[in-house]
Amino acid sequence: MPEEVITMVKIPFSEIERSVRSRHSLPDKLIDVRLEGDALVLCFTEKPSTQSIEMGMSKSSSVRKKRRRKTRRKRNRMKTRGWEIVSRMVNSKGQRCAIYKPFVDALRQTLLPVEQKEVVTKILRSNGNKPSEASIQYFLENTLEYLAGQQIQNSSEE
């Protein structure tokens, strides 16, 4: 059986409190010490005055509510792997966006607005996305805006 060496360090809370208090200007009284995940949490408070004790007796029970951690949210990103970027531009809303070849090829044809939306949805789904209505509109509007700009550019060159 392999041997294992374990080193244990035991530090009293009062020593940790003194160390933290010397680095930061903290209130006088330590009221709570607890572990949250991999962190030690020290809660300090000022000594209450006699007026606040009389007025705030009922409030003290509601002050000690447990804090909830902010949950990490997954960012909604569209998978665009494998799509060739035709152009990068700033759209009418001031957002920087990329224009992708599958959308340009599909929307160059004259289609009804409903058909355009269906084509964009189909392209997004074909790459493993579950597009929201906002995402569909984003890709559709940006591509149509790009194509309109190309038409204007081509007509001015002639």
Image: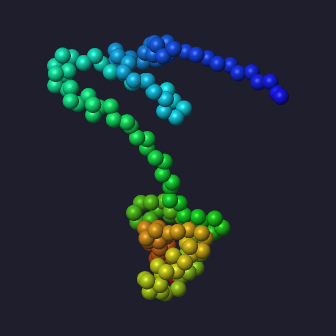
Colouring convention used in this rendered image of the protein: rainbow
Q: Quadrant of residue 31?
A: top left
Decide which of 68, 143 is in the foreground and name it: 68
Task: Please tell me which residue is depicted at 38% across the width and 37% down the height of the picture.
Answer: 67
**Is 127 placed left or right of 12 in the picture?**
right
Q: Position of residue 15 (x, y in %)?
A: 49, 12
For the N terminus, give its image quadrant.
Answer: top right
Q: Position of residue 111 (x, y in %)?
A: 48, 86
Q: Quadrant of residue 22?
A: top left
In the rendered image, the residue lying farthest to the front is 1
**Where 96 sits versus 105, above or below?**
above
**Where 29 sits versus 100, above or below?**
above
Residue 28: in sight, yes or no?
A: yes
* Count of marks placed on residues: 0
**Where 112 sits versus 103, above or below?**
below
Q: Quadrant of residue 70?
A: top left
Decide which of 119, 19 is in the foreground and name it: 19
Task: Please tell me which residue is depicted at 52% across the width and 80% down the height of the picture.
Answer: 119
Q: Position of residue 127 (x, y in %)?
A: 61, 70
Residue 157: in sight, yes or no?
A: no
Q: Position of residue 95 (x, y in %)?
A: 45, 60
Task: Please tell me which residue is depicted at 39% across the width and 63% down the height of the picture.
Answer: 93
**Where 98 sits versus 145, above or below?**
above
Task: Please tell me which residue is depicted at 26% across the width and 28% down the height of the picture.
Answer: 60
Decide which of 71, 62 is in the foreground and name it: 62
**Is 32 placed left or right of 158 in the picture?**
left
In the rendered image, the residue lying farthest to the right is 1
